[in-house]
Amino acid sequence: MHAESEIREPLILGNKTYHQISEDIVRPIEGKATKQWYMLLTLAVICFLWGIGCLAYTIGTGIGVWGSNNGVDWAWDITNFVWWIGIGHAGTLISAVLLLFRQKWRMAINRSAEAMTIFAVMCAAIFVTLHTGRPWLDYWLFPLPNQFGSLWVNFNSPLLWDVFAVSTYFSVSLVFWYTGLVPDFAMIRDRAVKPFAKKFYSLLSFGWGGSARHWSRFEEVSLVLAGLSTPLVFSVHSIVSMDFATSVVPGWHTTIFPPYFVAGAVFSGFAMVQTLLLIMRKVYHLENYITIKHIEYMNIVIIVTGSIVGVAYLTELFISWYSGVEYEQYAFLNRATGPYWWAYAAMMTCNVISPQIFWFKKLRTNLAFTFVMSIIVNIGMWFERFVIIVPTLCRTFLPSTWNMYHPTFIDIGIFTGTIGMFFTFFLLFTRYFPVIAQAELKSIVKASGQEYKEKAKHAAH
Amino acid sequence: MSNVTIHAIFDDEEPLMSSAKTLKSNGIRVKDVFSPFPIHGIDPVIGVPRTWIAICAFIYGITGLSLGTLMMWYMMINDWPTDIGGKPSFAYYMNMPAFIPISFECTVLCAAHGMAITYYLRCWLVPGAKAKNPDPRTTDDKFLMVVETKPENKNDIESILKNGGASEIHYK
């Protein structure tokens, strides 16, 4: 068994036995869904259907129905793509990087954060598959033998790197998530009473039994997958940033992009985890597992990554001035004072100033405040991608191509649709899947459980 | 005479661990242990060798890297070299820097999926497989030890297990 310093705060509150943990995790699955759950699901499904309608209209008519135009040819779709894929990064960071650093607090949040990763990457995929204009030809993105004069995809292009990076990231995250889910499905299977539930979870649990040999392989697989996912997650957002950084567009052509995008991704992802978990812990009564301490740890990550993002913004401004290149200087001046100054101001306020408030311990342990902040950070990070893309493209080298970008009804509809899809999937996940990695949690209850910690404290004195 | 199989159920990991150690020192082999979570340190006691799965992952990774390299060399350099943006594709090593991201992705893709497939097949965790635990409580809060022995040792083992803290003992 693992020993832990008594100074560290307990990660599992209350008097929990192994059986009690199973009961608490299974309650939302075995019990009846609440009214709020149905209401939220209805709302999410309506948004999702709305989005499907807008998608169908886009595919049927062409991407001329979007607000993108000749100058601003990348707009909402790429903004949304980068935003969603960035949100996904926190899940991998929590499950992989924190596993490598042996952070036990990850165990209460990794399952739902990874689910968030998978759903966010699915939302992101909608935008990239659609922005090609003819999504039925998207298989051209893959290196397939073809009839067009043996022309292959271009392996020098960051856009192709993106295809490989995002698909690898999605599939590896899915496998990582599922491998962790198998023992927990088995736990639900073994206590299921209703025949359909028994069948359903037997199928999902793949016959897991928990023998010592299997656990030993399970732990090795988790560790190696974490080791593989860690550089993978950094590569994905670095490559996304190279879609911009390798182009010769002032304001995009900067070497700071990869680290700055990765920090921004983790920043926005943690904010989304907070938004989801703060609701989930309340609705499903998981306050004993997702404690204030967990929320505080995540807020600390938000301060750190938010500060990195802030430093990156200021560095960009300084370098553009210091470079002496007037196009670079203009690009940044235009972002801050041009027609989209309000987007820049929103980005700076939400991402640089607001997370610094978390230096106050009172505020970073306040749930209502954290919830509001998590929404603010997500809005700020959406504006960051908008500021990088739209104001840059609306003022490029040729003044004759200068024009404004206005999103259409369809642009907004598709974005709303992806939010609906994300929440639909997440709500279904919380209802039918174990939202906390209970097997892992049981292994730390004696080292980090409140009751055991207090006993150890008394024994020491 | 045929062997008897003993299923001893414990309420916690420590009594199971100490009983396993006692059995081992008496020269009795524990066949398997089923538990709701991994019991660290049990493997050497019950003779579970260290898994090779990480080495498999390394080999799959090397395979992925080679396949990725071969693919890019064939498509970009050998089959249809194209001058893209003033950057001709004369030789693999010249274009190599641009190929690093995809080489990496191919390595990770093959290592992760190869290892996962090996793991699922090696443990025979497949959709529709029958539950492998002999008692359904072992995924919740019970720890089960399986000992296979000759009938004449039965009583000795039973007393070791009982003294070690087993809450239930069943014979199969």
Image (tube, rainbow, N blue to C red):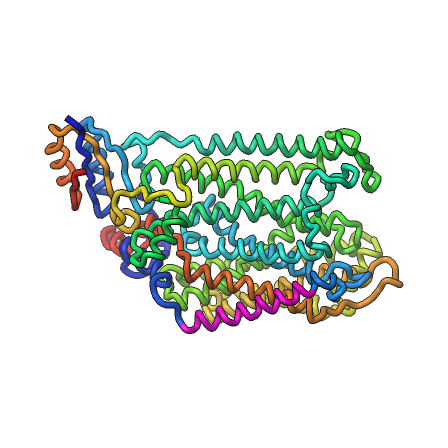
**Residue B65 x %, y %:** 61, 33
Between A207 and A92, the one nearer to me in the picture: A207
The quarter of the displayed image where residue B98 is located: top right
**Residue A241 x %, y %:** 68, 51
Residue A305 in sight here: no
The quarter of the displayed image where residue A391 is located: bottom right
Q: Is residue A135 above or below residue A227?
A: below
The quarter of the displayed image where residue B49 is located: top left
Residue pictured at 13% horizontal, 40% vertical: B163
Q: Quadrant of the N terminus of chain A?
A: top left
Between B133 and A332, the one nearer to me in the picture: B133
For this view, does A384 lie left or right of residue A368? right
Residue pictured at 52% horizontal, 50% vertical: A92
For this view, does B165 lie left or right of residue A74? left
Residue A434 in sight here: yes
For this view, does A241 lie left or right of residue B50? right
Segment colored magenta: A35-57
Q: What is the chief secondary structure element of the magenta stretch?
A: helix
**Residue B126 x %, y %:** 41, 42
Residue pictured at 34% horizontal, 43% vertical: B130
Q: Please tell me whether residue A149 belongs to the stretch shown in magenta.
A: no
For this view, does A257 lie left or right of residue A173? right
Residue pictured at 68% horizontal, 65% vertical: A57
**Residue B106 x %, y %:** 61, 38
How many numbered marks, from 0 up? 0
Q: Please tell me whether residue A46 belongs to the stretch shown in magenta.
A: yes
Q: Is residue B51 above or below residue A424?
A: above
Between A194 and B143, the one nearer to me in the picture: A194
